[in-house]
Image: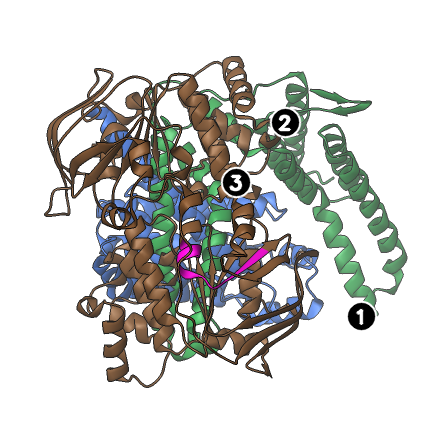
Chain colours: A green, B brown, C blue
Amino acid sequence: MNRDGNRLCLNFDPRTKILLLIELDIILFMGHSLIYETCVLLFCSLILAIGGQRKSAAKFLTVYMVFVVMQWFVDPYVEIFIFSLLHFITVCVRKLLPCIMLGKWLIATTEVSSFVAALWKMKIPRDVIITTSVMFRCFPTIKEEWESIQIAMKMRGIDLNMKRMVTSPVRTMEYLFVPLFISVLNVSDELAAAALCRGLDKPGHHTCMEPVCFRWFDYVFMMVATIWLFVMCALWIRGYAV
Amino acid sequence: MIEMKDVSFCYAQSDTESLCGVNLSIADGECILLCGKSGCGKTTMTRLINGMIPDFYDGELKGEVLVNGINPISSPLHEISDMVGTVFQNPRTQFYTMNTTSEIAFGCENRGMEPDAIRKRVTQAAEDLGIQGLLDRNIFQLSGGEKQKIAFASIYAVNPEVYVLDEPSSNLDCFAIRELRSILELLKAQGRTVILAEHRTWYLEELVDRAVYMEQGKIVREYSMQELKRFTMEERIETGIRPVSLSDYPLSEKKSVKSDKYLSVQDLRFAYKKETALQIPDAKFQAGNITAIIGKNGAGKSTFVSALSGIFKKQKGTVCMDGKRQNPKERVAVSYMVMQEVNHQLFTDSVEEEIVLGTQGLSADRLEHILEQMDIADLKERHPMTLSGGQKQRVAIAAAVFCGKKILIFDEPTSGLDFSHMMQTVILLQKLKSPDTYIFVITHDYEFILSACDEVVQIEMGCIKEKYSLNIKSLKKLRDFYQIN
Amino acid sequence: MENQRKGHSSRKAIAAGVFIALYLVTYVIVGAICMPIAAIFLLMPEVVALLAAPTYHMMLAKSPAGTPIFIAAVIPSLILIASGHIPIAPLVSIPVGIIAILLARKGDYREFKWNAVSHIVFSWNLFGGFVPIWFMRDYFFESTLEGGMSQEFCDTVRSLTPWWVLPVMLAATALFSLLGSLFTKKVLNKHLAKAGVL
């Protein structure tokens, strides 16, 4: 938990974040009325506000309100094409706003290292954690290698474009894949060498510098979301619509 | 401390022995330099000590290796990593995480240390190595030298007794190499044993206790740094050991090629994500010259040559070649860049195909002539990826020459090369000089510049800071840049 | 010795991670090109199947195990959830991943034939994002508009997707996957074997 001046910023455990995202996504689709949607959105805004993204929360709330107002104005004129288009946009973005909010919040506030630490805590097999963490780390490297190969292809006059893909697809794919695979394999080997020479495969417990653990707010929010989900499921089974 | 008794090793895919009856004894706290030409076996020696043989490299081993009484061949790699820390050559691919602090903590985390202890070690490592400013940053945004320091810190936090370094300076500029030197001084003061496999020796004068010179898998003799300093040019070419003292290195006379063709640049600008990366108001380059492009890492050297050769579509300004204005697309058609990472530019499965790639109308005579000129005629059917680094480079150059490219750019062609191969590259580049060819070389290699280049361009923050013909008078400017007195 | 084997398994896990990253990059790039244009929107799984086949085979060559297959099959659907799409995708990708593993396992993850069959099924994991077109029709079109897509886009796609298009797409994806595997076997593997890499 950080107190940054007078700003409250709670460090949710990554596991909490994932659970909240999944549960709230499902909760969102179980109700249809505007009031219900607003409740979901407010809950998500609360999470963002105390979870470190106050500005984002305010921004999303504003967008939501704008869309609600827009829909209210546009509703009577839906027969006109341009307004039906507007209607669709406002309704749809609005409906999915909580999902987008939580997704962005998860990605923005979770460090890869905390995420990996959470995986270790969950006692997921070592090889799965290695594969997942290497995956994240490799995106920028693959991008760099790919850009470099593209420059080389340009210089040789064999760069990728639609025309070449159609006239000689096999050759083009060969020129594309061969240097890419070879450099990716080199990356993989060098990465493995450096990691194993630092004890990656040491048997026994693996710790993390920033330990992740559940705190009171994790439990509170998880409980609220889970109870809400149960209630909605019960209502749905019973045939009530909200 | 480290003992090698009668060690012979042969890699699994190879017929010849990489090491032949090697006997070496290294005491605690010594700093040893393993030197010799490429392929002499020094890297194999490091792999025996740090445990990568046999975990990574299969082969047949005879003899005995002991590190602190433990046999690194039969022990698992993670056990050896407690005693022997390795810093690799390539800063880009050594990293497991994306954040500097996590990276430094990596080794400790693998060992199951308590979080508090890990944090203490990380802070200590950052303090000792002077990198507090690099903590908690995205590794991908660091320069090569900074990345190398993080790699060191990661090993330092685990605190092994032995440090094994495989050509740590090959991707660094001279400023970063000086910082590397201060880290090594620190390690030496702490009594660590340091084993370096290196070509560059100028930064090691005060550090190395013994230089072990190897040739074809055998230890030929040992030198002191003072003896290496007194080497003549012939001895350097024979042993491949780079000069210890750069200030004595002579500027050579180059055959000059006269030409009246110019590549002129006017108001060349390029912005990368709204930030101006390059701004050249006015510059002129004469054909028939080899121009060295120097500058700190991140100064904009690659940006400059990329803009010059027309790779960036969104560049602004005009570039005129031979009096005619050329837009980026036209320039790309006549430019060729031999990249530092040679694997990115080899596309086919035979040397012959590689050279004629992208051209129409094969002229068999011309091909034969170029193969001869580049000394790769007997490699015609081989797959380019199976060649040695130097051979790959010659194939890349042959391809450029075959399609008659006018602007040739070389990105660090001599990094990681021993002295004799560096001189061979010099000769090769001199052969390419012609009245209508423009040759640019991005390089950190002082000896190479003095031996091969006619002109020097210094780039700083995307602008040309200095541009001069290299002669006795202007040599001082170059030496000031390298801080050689 | 047991620890040495463990070292090798970590090395394979790293290779798997690198190739899965490559697969995801392929997926994202093809998606970025195909998604916004109505006419080729439905071609996305096919093109990905074609371009990802070499990556899939290489991944299994360097890391012959079931876990990478599962991770590669499920991650795209998780990305869809995290970016605000309907959380239905895992319902497709998880069973598909499991079947792909079982198929590849028949050849011990090393036989090309079984790996190619496994890839056909694997490529169907992308349908997690497309299945709503038929099974949750209205919701799908509403959520597509969220991305700023035009009404004409939705109309075109709606007209292009009568019920029989789904099985056709599945078959087309299988076909493209086979083409990709064929390319891998006949062209790429030969080249890489000559290079000494495979």
Residue that badge 3 annotates: B175
Image coordinates of residue B173 in percent, x first then y, are 49, 45
Residue A158 shows in this picture: no
Classify residue A7 as left or right of residue B373.
right
- The subunit letter for the residue under badge 1 reads A
Classify residue B284 as left or right of residue C44.
right
The Cα atoms of the two marked residues, 3 and 1, are separated by: 65 Å
Classify residue B295 as left or right of residue B4.
right
Q: Quadrant of residue A86?
A: bottom right
Image coordinates of residue C112 in percent, x first then y, are 23, 55
- The subunit letter for the residue under badge 2 reads A
Residue type for callout 3: Phe
Residue that badge 1 annotates: A81
Are there few (<14), some (14-19), or many (20+) residues within 10 Å of tag 2?
some
| Labels 3, 1: front one | 3
Q: Earlier in the sequence, mark 2 or mark 1?
A: 1
- The subunit letter for the residue under badge 3 reads B
Q: Residue at x 60, y 48 (%)?
A: C86
Q: In this view, which residue lies farthest toward the front?
A: B473
Looking at the rendering, the stretch of residues picked out in magenta corresponds to: B448-458
Residue that badge 2 annotates: A226
Q: Quadrant of residue B257?
A: bottom left
Image coordinates of residue B438 in percent, x first then y, are 47, 72
* Relative vertical location of residue C54 with respect to residue B398 in this rendering, above or below: above
* Relative vertical location of residue A211 with respect to residue C155 in this rendering, above or below: above
Q: Residue at x 84, y 54 (%)?
A: A71
